[in-house]
Image (tube, rainbow, N blue to C red):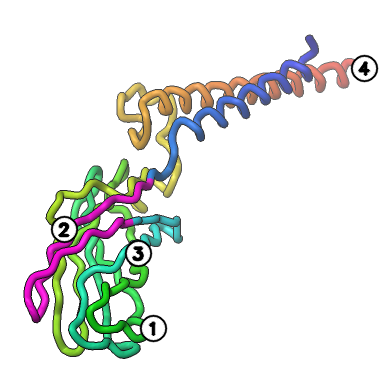
Amino acid sequence: MSYRKRTAALASTAALVGSVVLMAAPAARAEVVDVKYQCKTPIGDKSAVSPIDIKGVKSGSGYKITMSWQKGVSSSPVDLGKGSMKPSAVIQLGGADKGTLKVTGPANQAVVPANTPIKINDLSGTYTPKESGEVTFTAGVLTIIALGTTTTCTPTNSPGPSLSLDVTASGGGGGDTQSESGSGSGDSLPQTGPEDSAIALGTLGGTVLLVGAAGSLWVTRRRRRSAAG
């Protein structure tokens, strides 16, 4: 086999291994989770269950996190006029990072009739990773401010995460750049996915280096032949 054909074959192998890496280490995993809220309202306690969806989209050095309610929670004994109800919530962070993320959204854009479930608009906020690894996002306390009153709804069923993200801290060595190969340390590759994805990435790095060496060898021999001619 000629050097040119060998180089092409090695390049194809590198591309194939790269595809395996991408499939083995998904950047995000989302799941709609039922959250049972216990709400403290001005007219007494109420409860409701709503499926919660949380999504994350890369935005600069962080992520735009959006929280959605698929069913209404709580209710009002009187009509809530347009713009009179303002919701906000906190999302609990877990895994590689700890703390909370506050998400907010617009006031109601239409009248909420009395004694009907209050539909919460999508709420969003910006999450900037402080640690690298897998971070989970779980529904926390929901707060509704309306007509000068405050309603607080707290999850009571210990819901699981609605979203998991593999993230890299903005100060952790330059964005998404992986650790250099050949360091000999067990922590040379961030464990943000399955262990075999780290092994596959190491294989990809070796393949890329091999392609580079083969390419250099082919160019060197060609130059020598040209000089001899």
The disc, 4 or 3, on the residue closer to the chain's N-terminal end is 3
Question: Is residue 167 among what the camera can see?
Answer: no
Q: Tell me the distance, in whole angstroms, between the alpha carbons under discs 4 and 2.
A: 80 Å
| Image marks 3 and 1: residues in contact by CB distance under 8 Å | no
User: Which span is picked out in magenta?
Assistant: 30-52
Relative to 59, 32 lies left or right: left
At a point 66% along the width and 20% down the height, the residue shown is: 10
Residue linked to disc 3? 126
Secondary structure beneath disc 1? loop
Residue linked to disc 2? 155
Q: Tell me the distance, in whole angstroms, between the alpha carbons under discs 3 and 1.
A: 23 Å
Residue linked to disc 1? 109
Residue linked to disc 4? 229
Question: Which amino acid, by three-letter code, is at mark 1?
Answer: Gln
The disc, 3 or 1, on the residue closer to the chain's N-terminal end is 1
Residue 77, percent from left and from top: 18, 84
The disc, 4 or 2, on the residue closer to the chain's N-terminal end is 2
- Depth-wise, is mark 4 or mark 2 nearer the camera? 2
Considering depth in this image, is 106 or 217 the residue closer to the camera? 106
